[in-house]
Image (tube, rainbow, N blue to C red):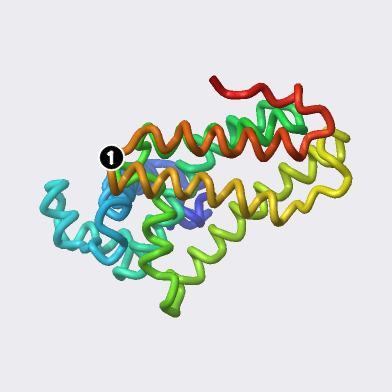
Amino acid sequence: MASELGVSDDAQAGGGATGTKLDGRVERGNQTRRLVLRRTVDIASVEGLDALSVGRLATELKLSKSGVFALFGSKEELQLATIRAAGRIFLDNVVEPARQSPPGIGRVRQLCARWLDYSEQRVFPGGCFFYGVIAEFDAREGAVHDALVHADRDWNGRVKDCIAEALDTGELRPDTDIPQLAFEFIAFMETANAQSVLHDEPDAYRRAGVAITARLRAAATDPSLVPQLP
């Protein structure tokens, strides 16, 4: 962990006044990095990753430009760090809570419900962070594009894995097309996000929930496992 924070193993182990000062600088740097990234994910969710700049962040957060630049080194690295930070927030709000449900249809429902809640509650002010920035970079090339491809594939994979678990428990019909079902669920969720953000239409989330529930009931071996939404 020490090397990840930019501190050599020798410096960390050395102790004394020099080690204390170095540890203090590292911790202050980490705190500043967290502060900057909390702001960048919010900006990017509304204005896109291209809206990020060292000068803007320094001004808004009352930091020195040189200090912010030293934390990231380039605009591209700032964008990549922002994607990673958004990914951690997404995991905390969507993926990890859904894992508390046992494998099966219940976990599938929870994963979709947590995603809709994450968008509706504006964990990021622009709605789903990844929905917005993927549209910004989908036709480009480079490290940022590749990082977003990885994030999108990871999310798609999680949805498919969750559906596969429900199939393995016997709660979904044996002929269930896992990629197709995952595609439909994600389409419903992303459409709700887009409609809500563009039109300020909160009912879009209810409609997505109804659509996901109906599709899941149709695929279930026992539809009673999927309570209908009111």
Q: Is residue 14 at least partly visible in the picture?
A: yes
Quadrant position of residue 16: top left
Amino acid on which disc 1 is placed: Asp
The spot of residue 195 in percent (x, y) is 36, 46
The spot of residue 85 in percent (x, y) is 42, 49
From the viewer's perspective, is 166 left or right of 87? Answer: right
Quadrant position of residue 218: top right
Quadrant position of residue 224: top right
Q: Which residue is at a point 12% across and 47% down the rendered structure image? A: 62
The single residue placed furthest to the bottom in the displayed view is 141
Q: Is residue 114 positioned above or below 81 on the image?
A: above
From the viewer's perspective, is 39 left or right of 167? Answer: left
Mark 1: give few (<14), some (14-19) or many (20+) Cα within 10 Å: few
The spot of residue 84 in percent (x, y) is 46, 54
Q: Is residue 28 at least partly visible in the picture?
A: no
Closer to us: 128 or 213: 213
Q: Which residue is mark 1?
A: 200
**Local SS, label 1:** loop
Q: Which residue is at a point 58% across and 30% down the rendered structure image? A: 97
The spot of residue 58 in percent (x, y) is 15, 54
Q: Is residue 73 positioned above or below 19 on the image?
A: below
Q: Which residue is at a point 40% across and 58% down the rendered structure image? A: 81
Closer to us: 78 or 138: 138
Q: Which residue is at a point 66% across and 48% down the rendered structure image? A: 158
The quarter of the picture where the C terminus appears is: top right
From the viewer's perspective, is 168 left or right of 126? Answer: right
